[in-house]
Amino acid sequence: MLQRIRARRLAVVALLAASAACAPRAPDLPAPGGAARYPDFMFPEAAADLGSPEAQERHNAGWLWLQAGELRAAGRNFNATLKLAPDFYPAEAGLDYDAAVSHFDRALETNSQYVPALVGRGEALLALGERERALTSFESAVAADPDLSSLRSRIEVLRFRGLQDDVAAARKAAEGGRLDEARTAYKRALIASPQSPFLLRELALVERRAGDLPSAVQHAQQAVDLEPTDVRSLMVLGELYEAVGDLEKAVGTYEAAVGLEPNPATDERISELRERLLLAAMPPEFQQIETSATVSREQLAALFGVRLDDLIKRAPGRDAVVITDSRGSWAAPWIMLVARTGLMEVYANHTFQPATTVRRSDLAQAASRVLSLIAKERPSLATSWRSSSRRFPDLPPGHLVYPAASLAVEAGVMSVLDDGTFQLARPVTGSEAVGAVRKLEELAESAAR
């Protein structure tokens, strides 16, 4: 194999060799017996019928001087060979100096399968730091001569070392905020190892930082496809799906991750995304609840129906309920659901009055009915709620709504105002209603375990 030769030193050789214009004569030879200076160099062998015998002799002399370490003498003899026979391309392969690549290229123009020139060109390119082009030249040499097992092994080593260098450079560039440089290095590494999940995952992270989310998703998905059990890649892909707004795919990807490696934080994230998906699919009237100054009965019915769906499905139903004013409501299905389970009352005239504003007394009574359902499934949960009686300055124990208000407060579903009062007639805000139903949902989930 041709080893790297320093460019500056070889430039001097080229200059001196080019200036030699000796008349053809028997070449001088180095003293025999010395150790070869470049034992791994490949002799640029010439066909017997190529050039004149004198050209062959000069070519062989150039090689002997090269192995003796006399680069000037080697250059003179190789140039003398080309003077005698301009088409003697093996001599081009022997001229290994700063312009070596162009010499090898000229040799390969004559014979594209000339292995010494392919190897020499690869060595010259490698010395110039052009690893990928050097590897291409080496691979062409192996294709032309499959018996070059040592060169094949060297190609593998160079690719592995190059991969390590590229990964290190990519990570360093990413740490330094040089994202374009990092992307280039990762892509170069992927040329050497295209089936590497960790390279694809790290490239995706760099692309996310660079703002190229489509490419980041593509590469993260490729990483997961190559290694579906890699939790890190799944988490990166889930975050990217979330970033591009594809919440359904984000949930599915996070679920695959926690299926392999349970993680409470990821479980919580999944719940949040499901809530966002649920909210996005709901009518505008539902989406506006949390920010509303007041809440209507139809909005509260929808909150119960959506958030407490599992509990309501487990609850015993009542006989058919007649409601005369719910058909035109956007919340009609949930109104019927909460009415049949008795969570919200239907008035004596068979009306539900969907648009009526919910008061704190209304929410307390509805919450107490839900708490009763929960207590039937898990009586132990209700012990602390029912063992205490809350005192309210504005609500005597004998009041009809007192038991519901006390139960709701003791269970943590509702709270008193700053002065300790309950204020039955005060309208319920959207955030207050959402908070109450979320607490009921937590209690219902505890009862179901």
Image (cartoon, grey):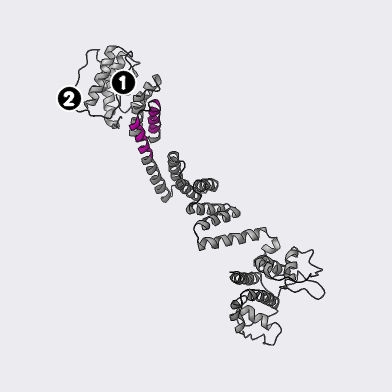
The spot of residue 122 in percent (x, y) is 36, 30
- Give left or right: position of 323 versus 415: right
Q: Give the dominant element type of the magenta stretch: helix, strand or loop.
A: helix
Q: Residues within 10 Å of mark 2 (few under 14, many from 20)?
A: few
- Residue under pointer 1: 45
Quarter holding the C terminus is bottom right
Quarter holding the N terminus is top left
Of 81 and 114, nearer the camera is 114
Which image quarter: residue 100?
Answer: top left
Report if the CB atoms under discs 2 and 1 are less than 8 Å apart. no
Of 126 and 197, nearer the camera is 197
Write the start and end of the magenta stretch as one range. Answer: 133-159
The spot of residue 268 in percent (x, y) is 54, 63
- Give left or right: position of 385 versus 326: left
Marking on residue 33: 2
The spot of residue 427 in percent (x, y) is 69, 75
Marking on residue 63: none
The spot of residue 106 in percent (x, y) is 37, 21
Is residue 190 among the parts visible in the rendering? yes
Give above or below for 332 relative to 205.
below
Which image quarter: residue 30?
Answer: top left
Q: In percent of the image, x 58 and y 62: which residue is there?
A: 271
Give above or below for 344 relative to 18.
below
Of 73 and 397, nearer the camera is 397
From mark 2 to mark 1, how far is it between C-alphas? 21 Å
